[in-house]
Amino acid sequence: MLLSKEAILGAQDMTTQDVEVPEWAGTVRVKALTGSERDAFESEIVQRNGKNITQNLKNIRARLVVMAVVDEQGNRLFGFRDIEALGEKSAKALDRVFAVAQELSGLRDEDVDELAKNSVATPGDSSSSA
């Protein structure tokens, strides 16, 4: 059976997982990123200046945690202004939450490298001499 537009848009496909964080003496709820959120996260990683492509990995764990940790109603606990402060927390704790957010959102370590490779050649960059 093929899905209809309504079936796809009505599907409840956003998952969450509660993660015990002993360093913070409690549990946090981590949600999967939406497609738009993942695109925004990935666009922050790849920095483009003309034809120069660099990867901005500064506070990458804190950035993803900010986007993925929510309260019981699904509202984000942190705002983007909290990235620096969150980045000062235990690397072990951040990594634990980051790993779950990665898994729930379908992000793999290789995705960052793939983003940079794919960003090097975009349709507007190549010239043809016909």
Image (cartoon, grey):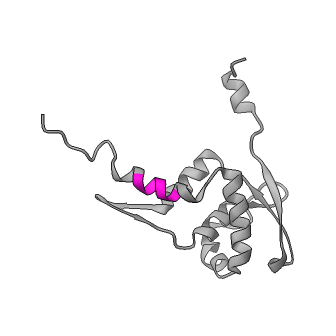
How many marks the image carries: the answer is 0
Residue at image position (32%, 42%) is 123
Is residue 115 a member of the stretch shown in magenta?
yes
Residue extending farthest to the left is: 130
Q: Relative to residue 53, is residue 92 drawn left or right?
A: right
Q: Is residue 14 above or below residue 22?
A: above
Q: Relative to residue 68, is residue 17 drawn left or right?
A: right
The picture quadrant where one finds residue 65 is: bottom right
Q: Is residue 92 above or below residue 42?
A: below
Residue at image position (69%, 71%) is 95
Residue 6: x %, y % from top left? 70, 25
Which region is colored magenta? 112-117
Residue 109: x %, y % from top left? 58, 60
Q: Is residue 93 above or below residue 129?
A: below
Is residue 119 a member of the stretch shown in magenta?
no
**Quarter of the rendering occupied by the C terminus:** top left
